[in-house]
Amino acid sequence: MKKIETIEKLKRMRRPAFIDIDLLRNLKFQKWVLLIVLSLALSLLLAPQFSVIRPTFSVGMVPDYDIRADHDFLVEDKIATDHKKMEAARSVLRVYDYDFHTPDILAARLTQAFSLLEVRYYKAPEEVKEALNRLPQAERIKRIKGDFEQTTGIVLSDEELAVLHENAFSETLRDDLIRLIRSFRGADYLDRPLDSPGNFTVGRADTKNIVAIADLDELEDYFVKPSIAIFGKSNSALRRTAESLAAKLIKPQLMLNHIATEKHRKWVVDRIKPVYFKVKKNELIIKAGEPLAYQDLLKLEAFYSTEGGDSVFNLKVLAGFFVTILMLTIIFHQSSKGLLKALRKSNKDLLFLSIVMLLHIVIMKSGIFIAESIAQTFSLFSAETLYFALPFAWSTILIVVCLNRTVAFVFAIFSAILVTFLFEVKLPIFLYAFLGSAAPAYRMIHFRQRSAFFRSGLFAAAVNIVVVFCLTLLAGSATWLEIFLRMAMAGIGGLLSGLIVAGITPAFEALFAYTTDIKLMELCNLNQPLLQRMIVEAPGTYNHSIIVATMVEAAAESIRANPLLARVSAYYHDIGKLSKPLYFIENQQSWKNKHDRLSPKMSSLVIISHVKEGCELAKHYKLGKAISDIIQQHHGMSIVSYFYDKAQKDKDPSVRSIPQSDFRYPGPKPQTREAGLVLLGDIVEASSRTLTDPTPSRIRNLVQARIKQVFTDGQLDQCDLTMNDVNNIAESFVRTLTGIFHQRIEYAGSGNKQPTGNTDQWPYRLSTDRKK
């Protein structure tokens, strides 16, 4: 024991630290890995366009392959967009800052100038006046002009200076000039920008209103009426001087605001919408052998951008991944119970379904590509019409052949949902894919001949035609020619489904070791090597197996189990006896029994071992897992009662102390209805041979007693046989055995008598190979 533990420790030490063998063997872990991988693969397949690295293109480059749009998308015309933005930028009005305080500033400056000159030259102290008077007249006038121009910032003409000097820069003149200037407060006649001669419009900085701007050279014309009102018409020289000074003093009230102008221009340009043109699905984006133009690059940029760019995990793939994993999680969760409980034992069936789903999507995408290519070549057919020729039903028919129709029905729903992601029109495709797949899958149950695939294809074609006709009438926009073409394509799609299944079924049979009805029909042939060996080496076992097969086939039909599987399994359920045929009473040529020289424990081991040896022969001859399982389960965990009773009666205490478990078959108990049928048929047929006078009533009593014994022992607890099924099985067994043991007329000298000799051999035969 310690040595074994040491060896196990050494094995664990040799394993890499990052590999957990127990985790890899865990069924739940395998299921989750399969779920994630399948979801990712499906999401990548369902993405409209996928590329790991975006190809690089440039203007003038000559591509060596075509690129065609697989969906509608918009392309921005950058040249047209830029032109539109430039036009909008040119139309934006410049923003100016409006100064409301300019008249006040001018009035203050004029007041300062007049006050300065009045105090300095005209109302100066006497000693200042005497000094000024000693100056030449021209010099004194020059000083007055200089001081005025320096204070006001304007240049006086000789006439203007003479008028002002004559009026001695009086307060009255000053006030009249200020009144004239203030008459233009808020006026819209201001300086023009240097780059815009003449009248123009701008946006005022405070209100964004539009105002008219006049040329300053025209301002004197606007001072005429106000000056007449202030100075009167009599003194024209004074009035002209006032108008001229006012025009010179008026300064621009609008100043260009560069920052606000650019901000407003940017706001307007940003609101300009890009100019797009549309590229339709199946339109040729670039053509092989033709140099690429700038417009082609725009199309390629938009094409790859709408598919998520260079990233593998773009949003469409990510969304598809989560949608797919959600649906698969529900299906995988239900694989351990409910409708899909047939998938609970291992993940082989889930792997099979995953491969079929991936292959189904690949076939659909390939079919879509072929349909669109044909539509571009032949104008008679549209791509939408050719889509109906796709073999939507092949996957569900294959699942019916390899598994069962319940799983196929669930698969039809799931596959129809996924397929809709490949088409623009969702609901009609979903209805067509689901109804066209589920109906033939639910109708076709048994595939016992190769022609069954063709019949399934015909049935799928008929369903497709009806569905397409109804969908087209509901759409109400197709012509009779289009209706006829769509119905023809639907028929082709159904026939293709049958042909595809007929071609790939053998591959899936071999790859996943499935035992289909066609495989069972091949094994039914009595010329099979194993059956030929049984005829020669174990004729009694062969005869027993043939009778059990007849019994269980009829019983399977009565409870709606698989009669073909039940019959074939009955043929091969005792093939393990070929290793030691003479240790079983039905194969012994004389009344001499080999068990007489063996201990009860050894005899039970020989009898029990035929189950294990039968499984090995089934594996060697590739009978399939379904038959191998029934061989393993056809005795359940029943006890070899004869040898156990013999051990209990032995004089040796050590023999009597052997536990009952050593005399039981290892099991497991029958897991399917067909396995339960073979167990019952095996026991009932063996027991029927002990009847000395097999009348119908005795046969019925025997059948009921044996079935009750098996049921009470709990051997049928793990298969789905109900009490009603058990009653139907008993009735079927009675009918079959009654036909076998029918009364015959005894002819004189026929010797048709009950065999003489040791009558214990009959119950002994039962106890060595069957449960009583």
Image: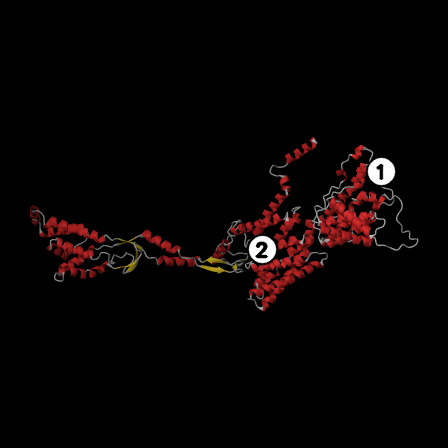
Q: Amino acid at mark 2?
A: Ile
Image location (x, y in percent) of residue 343: 65, 48
The residue positioned 59% from the left and 68% from the top of the image is 481
Which quadrant holds the N terminus?
top right
- Return the residue nearer the eye: 154 or 614: 614
Tell me the quarter of the image containing the C terminus: top right
x, y percentage for residue 676?
73, 48
The residue lying toward the viewer, choosing from 129 and 107, is 107
Direction from residue 244 to residue 698 in the image, left or right: right
- Position of 264 with respect to 665 (left or right) is left
The answer to whether residue 579 shows anywhere in this view is no
**How many other residues sit within 10 Å of disc 2, few (<14), some (14-19) or many (≥20)?**
some
Q: Position of residue 668 (x, y in %)?
A: 72, 43
The residue indicated by pointer 2 is: 417
- Against 595, is 419 above or below? below
Q: Which residue is mark 1?
A: 597
Query: Observer-nearest residue: 621 or 397?
Result: 397
**How is the model colour-coded?**
secondary structure
**Residue extending farthest bottom:** 480
Which one is in front in this view, the residue at disc 2 or the one at disc 1? 1
Which residue corresponds to the image point at 16% horizontal and 51% vertical from the top-left?
111
First in sequence, mark 2 or 1: give its number.
Answer: 2
Real-space Cα distance between discs 2 and 1?
Answer: 68 Å
How many numbered badges does the structure rendering display? 2
Q: Is residue 279 visible?
A: yes
Residue type, mark 1 in image? Arg
